[in-house]
Image (cartoon, helix red, strand yellow):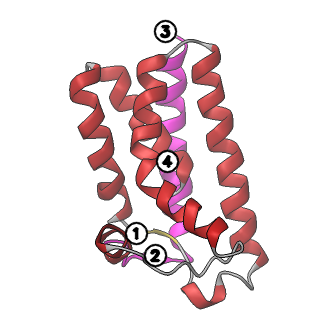
Amino acid sequence: MTATNHGLTGALIGAFLPLPIAIPVAFASHFVLDSLPHYGIPLKKRNETLVYRFIVYSDTLVALFIAATAVILHKWNMEITGWVAYSPDALWVVHYYKQDKNLHIKTKNKFMEFHRAIQRWERPWGILIDLGTTAVLLPLFLVQLLK
């Protein structure tokens, strides 16, 4: 699932649950979302495909913009739980830079192996599910953000 959707889901969890409870729920939400069908292409093709890179980089920018908005509006519960929900993907980012920006990231530990294994429904058509999820979550997020 996209960073945007992980962040939005986590932020909404933080908007509705008190912070001590929201943190593990937001973390668990990451794996629930990743187990659903979502966008992806075979690992070996990720470095060659400009569309894949465009989606990953534009998603990152949107997610950072949303996070910055929560900071500006002092919605700290939403900010914290948004980052917690995204956090399992931080390992992929670290290894991406360690592997010279190679998008064919090798798993380095049992956690990464588990994380990759649950994403068996990554498909190109999954972009429709990702966009649909964003279309549902973004208005809900904005309502909570502006409260």
Eyeballing the image, is 4 above or below 33? above
Question: Which residue in the rendered view is the most extreme toward the top?
Answer: 147
Question: The residue under label 4 is which amino acid type?
Answer: Asn
Please give the residue where the numbered disc 1 appears in the rendered image.
37
The residue under label 2 is 122
Above or below 102: residue 55: above
Q: Can residue 17 be seen in the rendering of this structure?
A: no
- Which residue carries the number 4 mark? 5
Reading the chain from its start, which is encountered first: label 4 or label 2?
4
Between the C-alphas of marks 4 and 1, the distance is 13 Å
In magenta, the rendered stretch is 118-146
Q: Which mark is residue 147?
A: 3
Q: Is residue 139 found inside the magenta-colored segment of the image?
A: yes
| Residue 92 coordinates in the image, percent (x, y) | 52, 64
* Circle 1 residues within 10 Å: few <14, some 14–19, many ≥20: many
Residue in the foreground of this view, choosing between 50 and 27: 27
Q: Amino acid type of disc 1?
A: Pro
Tell me the kind of residue under disc 2. Glu
CA gap between label 1 and label 3 equals: 32 Å
- Pick out the residue farthest to the front: 98
User: Tag 2's secondary structure?
Assistant: strand
Q: Disc 2 vs disc 3: Cβ atoms closer than 8 Å? A: no
Looking at the picture, which amino acid does disc 3 mark?
A: Lys
In contact (CB < 8 Å): disc 1 and disc 2: yes
**x then y, percent, for residue 12:** 40, 30
| Nearest the eye: 39 or 69 | 69
Q: Earlier in the sequence, mark 4 or mark 1?
A: 4
Q: Residue at x 60, y 12 (%)?
A: 73
Q: CA distance from mark 1 to mark 2?
A: 6 Å
- Residue farthest bottom in this picture: 44
The image shows residue 130 at horizontal and vertical percentages of: 52, 58
